[in-house]
Amino acid sequence: DEKNRILLGKRARGKYKGLWCIPCGFVEYNEDIHEAAVREFKEETNLDIELLRIYSAQSNFHDPDKHTVGIWFLARVVGGDLKACDDLEDVSYFNLNELPPLAFPTDYIVIEQLKNDFESGHLL
């Protein structure tokens, strides 16, 4: 957001229930990754976003039964009213240095990258 905070969602169910994450989801078969990111963000936060660019790509090793690849986008909120939906029980903005317990190790990696890029001025 305008205060350089990150929007996180508190997971509502599953083995990561009660932990926070960058809003996320899966790409449907025959769905473009950009469209999937916009759709998943709307489904979980009720916010409409404009994707600015791909920010990071990481291998996800947290689930030994399923190896996935995550793609994180920089985006701007362009509409909607913030509320937790779908897989989330809460949503809130957090200072990058004051994070709640996160569900996924890759979110820590991406947030650390964000902090470094903000500090060095490389994000803009």
Image (cartoon, rainbow, N blue to C red):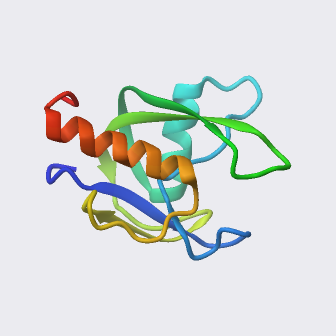
Task: Inspect this view and state whether residue 82 appears.
Answer: yes
Q: Residue at x 64, y 73 (%)?
A: 17
Taking depth in this image into account, of 43 and 123 the one nearest to the observer is 123
Q: Would you identify the image quadrant in which residue 32 lies? A: top right
Q: Quadrant of the C terminus?
A: top left
When the figure is inspected, residue 118 is found, relative to residue 90, above or below; the finding is: above
Residue 30, located in which quarter of the rendered image?
Answer: top right
Task: Report the residue at 31% width, 47% height from top.
Answer: 79
Q: Is residue 87 above or below residue 107?
A: below
Q: Position of residue 93 (x, y in %)?
A: 30, 63
Residue 42 visible in the displayed image = no
Residue 116: percent from left, percent from top: 25, 40
Residue 54 % position (x, y): 42, 25
* Depicted 54 relative to depicted 24: above or below: above
Q: Nearer the viewer, residue 74 or 58?
A: 58
Residue lying at 71% horizontally and 37% vertically, measured from the top left:
68
Q: Is residue 10 left or right of residue 8?
A: right
Q: Is residue 34 above or below residue 46?
A: above
User: Looking at the picture, how far across and down is residue 42, in whole percent?
Assistant: 48, 49
Exactly how many numbered labels are in the figure?
A: 0
Closest to the observer, 76 or 74: 74
Q: Residue at x 73, y 69 (%)?
A: 14
